[in-house]
């Protein structure tokens, strides 16, 4: 049934990671509902907003590296992980 | 903390969740899978990593398409939003004329995209089209099939003709929702027509304008059928927008991998710009 989707190991890991993040955020939200707050981002955000901004900026960090350099993708991945953590904590 | 008493409501959301999964999430996953592989036939695919992304991001043809697309979308917004507000302000508020105006404004919205393209293709021709013939008779050297400037003007005019009604109808509904007391208060204060618009009507139109800007941006950013029917992307590639470049790549050349990578980049651009519009407009209220 899923053969036509031509799954690869990296894309499977990617989607499993996204799924795990969403699941953990849902559990966290149910256990401890968040309130909107203002951090270093220019707008007041909820936890979900900060995750969305974190992931969207991460996607653009990857595109920037791909478009402008031939460096390994591990570098933008590392930067993205740090960025998402900072955005979630202080954003 | 308020505790949730009944979680049965989640089951009611389940059909929508399944529908979205089948119609959006699974195709999106498939596109991500295609974007990292070189697909030769349904049974032969090779993993190429981020190669297609590199190729697409460095392709000057796509850079040109993207630039054209942004110019087109922002031109559409710059024309249709003020024009739509203006039309809504000038429309009669009650009586038969109001109904007639609403019907007339709704007509362009009911016409399918390919028919709109065909109408304007004929309308703009110098030999059999009224607009083309009239312009040439007036001494204007108009030919949308040969001159890129004319092609752009025609594609923009076609979009304005087709979609300004949507903005006008949304604004009209927003204007009708403003209570009469606001206008009475403005009259007591002897507010000018401009002051009424600036401090009463425009702020009360904000929510419908958010919807209008988002709808028109997303629609114009993925425009395909109308310019394809009207100009076929020409002359040269002057009216070839992103979706047409994508279709040529995916179906014309059958480059599934690069087309999938391009689709995802396209999706990310739409997502970012729409989110920026939405956030900027919705947070303007909160910051006041």
Image (cartoon, rainbow, N blue to C red):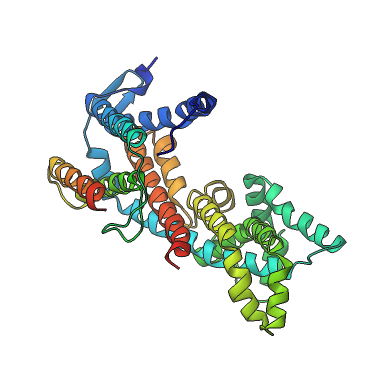
**Residue at the image point whose x is 73% and y is 70% from the top:** B90
Residue B193 appears in the rendering: yes
Residue at (30%, 23%) from the top-left corner?
A7
Q: From this view, report whether residue A54 is shown above or below residue B258.
A: below
Q: Is residue B124 left or right of residue A68?
A: right
Of residues B104 and B67, which is closer to you in this image?
A: B104
Q: Within the image, what quadrant is residue B136 found in?
A: bottom right
**Depth check, front residue: B229 or A80:** A80
Count of numbered tags: 0
Which corner quadrant holds the C terminus of chain B? bottom left
In x, y percent, where is residue A2? Answer: 37, 17
Which residue reaches farthest top? A1
Q: Is residue B137 visible?
A: no
Up the image or down, B21 lies above or below A72; here it is: above
The quarter of the rendered structure image containing the N terminus of chain B is top left
The answer to whether B234 appears left or right of A31 in the picture is: right
Q: Quadrant of residue A16?
A: top left
Please name whichever residue, B239 or A82, is drawn nearer the observer in this view of the structure. A82
Residue at position x 53%, y 57% from top?
B210
- Nearer to the camera, A46 or B72: A46
Q: Is residue B38 left or right of residue B152?
A: left
Residue B59, how many percent across, how many down? Answer: 29, 50
Residue A80, image x, y percentages? 20, 45
Q: Going by the picture, which residue comes out furthest to the front? A: B1
Residue B159, given in percent of the width and then of the height, sits at 60, 57
Picture residue at 36% right of the left edge, 30% below the top? B29
């Amino acid at each position: 049934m899923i053969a036509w989707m031509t799954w690869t190991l990296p894309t499977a890991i990617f989607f499993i990671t996204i799924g795990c993040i969403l699941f953990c955020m849902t559990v966290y939200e149910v256990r401890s509902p968040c309130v909107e707050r203002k951090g270093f981002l220019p707008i007041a955000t909820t936890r979900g907003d900060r995750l969305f901004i974190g992931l969207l900026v991460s996607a653009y960090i990857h595109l920037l590296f791909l478009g402008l350099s031939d460096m390994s993708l591990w570098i933008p991945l590392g930067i993205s992980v740090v960025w998402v953590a900072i955005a979630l904590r202080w954003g | 903390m308020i505790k949730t008493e009944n979680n049965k409501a989640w089951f009611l959301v389940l059909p929508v969740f399944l529908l979205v999964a089948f119609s959006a999430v699974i195709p999106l996953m498939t596109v991500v899978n295609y974007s990292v592989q070189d697909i030769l036939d349904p049974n032969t695919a090779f993993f190429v990593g981020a190669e297609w992304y590199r190729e697409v991001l460095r392709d000057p043809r796509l850079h040109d398409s993207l630039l054209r697309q942004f110019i087109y979308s922002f031109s559409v917004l710059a024309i249709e939003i003020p024009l739509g507000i203006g039309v809504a302000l000038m429309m009669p508020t009650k009586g038969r004329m109001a109904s007639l105006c609403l019907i007339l404004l709704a007509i362009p919205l009911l016409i399918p995209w390919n028919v709109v393209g065909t109408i304007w293709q004929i309308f703009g021709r110098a030999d059999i089209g009224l607009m083309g013939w009239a312009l040439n008779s007036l001494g204007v050297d108009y030919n949308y099939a040969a001159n890129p400037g004319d092609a752009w003007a025609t594609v923009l005019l076609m979009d304005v003709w087709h979609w300004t009604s949507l903005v006008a109808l949304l604004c009209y509904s927003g204007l009708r929702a403003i209570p009469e007391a606001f206008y009475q208060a403005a009259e007591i204060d002897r507010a000018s027509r401009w002051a009424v618009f600036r401090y009463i009507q425009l702020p009360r139109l904000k929510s419908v304008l958010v919807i209008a800007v988002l709808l028109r941006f997303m629609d114009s950013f993925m425009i395909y059928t109308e310019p394809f029917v009207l100009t076929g992307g020409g002359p040269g590639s002057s009216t070839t927008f992103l979706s047409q470049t994508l279709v040529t790549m995916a179906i014309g050349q059958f480059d599934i991998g690069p087309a999938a990578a391009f689709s995802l980049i396209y999706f990310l651009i739409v997502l970012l710009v729409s989110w920026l519009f939405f956030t900027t407009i919705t947070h303007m209220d909160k910051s006041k």
